[in-house]
Amino acid sequence: MSAFFIATTATAAFAQTGSTGQCGFQTLTFPPPANNGGAVALSDTGAILGGFQDSQSHSHGFLLYQGKLTTFMFPGSTNTTPHDISRTGTIVGEYTVTGDSKTHPFMVQSGGFRQITLPGFSNTTATANGVNANGDVVGQVASNTAVFGMGYLLHKGKLTIISFPGANGGTEPTSINDQGVIVGNYHLTSADPSHGFMWKAGVFSNINPPDSDGSAFVTKISNTGDIVGTYVSAADSHSHGFSFANGTYTKIDVPGSPDTFIRAVNKFDNVLASAQPGTKVVQVKGFCSAVF
């Protein structure tokens, strides 16, 4: 993500090497009832997907687009948790219902809800974490061998298991772009911290920022191939955002906050993040173009 360069001073935002001008961060707020919510995904058209809890602690999804907030729940669910939105507006996530402890993956397409069926895992707890414009879905499904579950790719009704080699603790894909590149996280053992990975044409590679303490949490990959996430620095033990593009890692820090967590990215290198400059967690957006 060459568009982002984090200045070394706490007061500077970040500069850009391109031609669209100065970049920066802005505080992001959501209208009621999602004012206590958090963002999880950002589309190439600037739509923000997120989730919030109501007064009874039930989870709802929301979509904020061009200033209009729409809230939603999977029909009949007690909790609905969205995770991703594609370039074409398809949403995926998971839901729960009363009397059933399992989570079920769902998709919203053209305003219609449907449960995602995983061949061979029709009655197993599962999530849907990422979706692309081709309708490909990635997520995690419960496993008898991996404590945190195993990853999957659902492409045109065909299920492919995604399991990082040696990841006995589990593999969790979190995002897939329109080129079919998958990113996510894995655990070597149940006690092992999260490690980031990329899966491209069946080949795995590690995502590991150079000053990491050995762990990383990858959240999204954009349609231009920029990968974002969060890691803990071995130098200061604080959480920092990062991007990885064209073989280069770039640290992303919200000015004035010791900890930054990157949630999403789109093809314009806009990011969504949360930060904690004091005692309160705030939502922020980072931008280098007018997509917001």
Image (spheres, helix red, strand yellow):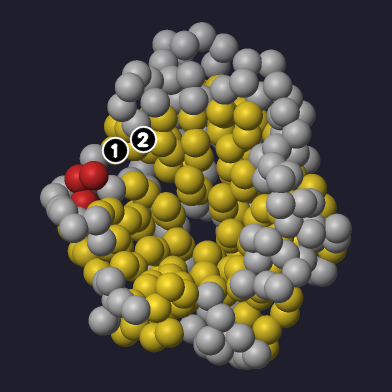
Answer above or below: position of 28 versus 34: above
Name the residue that disc number 1 marks: 28
Residue 11 pos. (x, y %): 42, 11
Answer above or below: position of 36 versus 170: above
Name the residue that disc number 2 marks: 284
The answer to whether residue 162 is seen in the rendering is: no
At label 1, the amino acid type is Leu
Q: Which residue: 23% across, 44% down?
A: 36
Residue 223 pos. (x, y %): 58, 59
Q: Which residue: 58% across, 59% down?
A: 174
Q: Which residue: 32% across, 56% down?
A: 51
At label 2, the amino acid type is Val
Q: First in sequence, mark 2 or 1: give its number.
A: 1
In which image quadrant can residue 69 be found?
A: bottom left
Marks 2 and 1 in Cβ contact (< 8 Å): yes
Q: Badge 2: how crowded within 10 Å, few (<14), some, or many (20+)?
A: many
Q: CA distance from mark 2 to mark 1?
A: 5 Å
Residue 197 pos. (x, y %): 73, 52
The answer to whether residue 217 is seen in the rendering is: yes
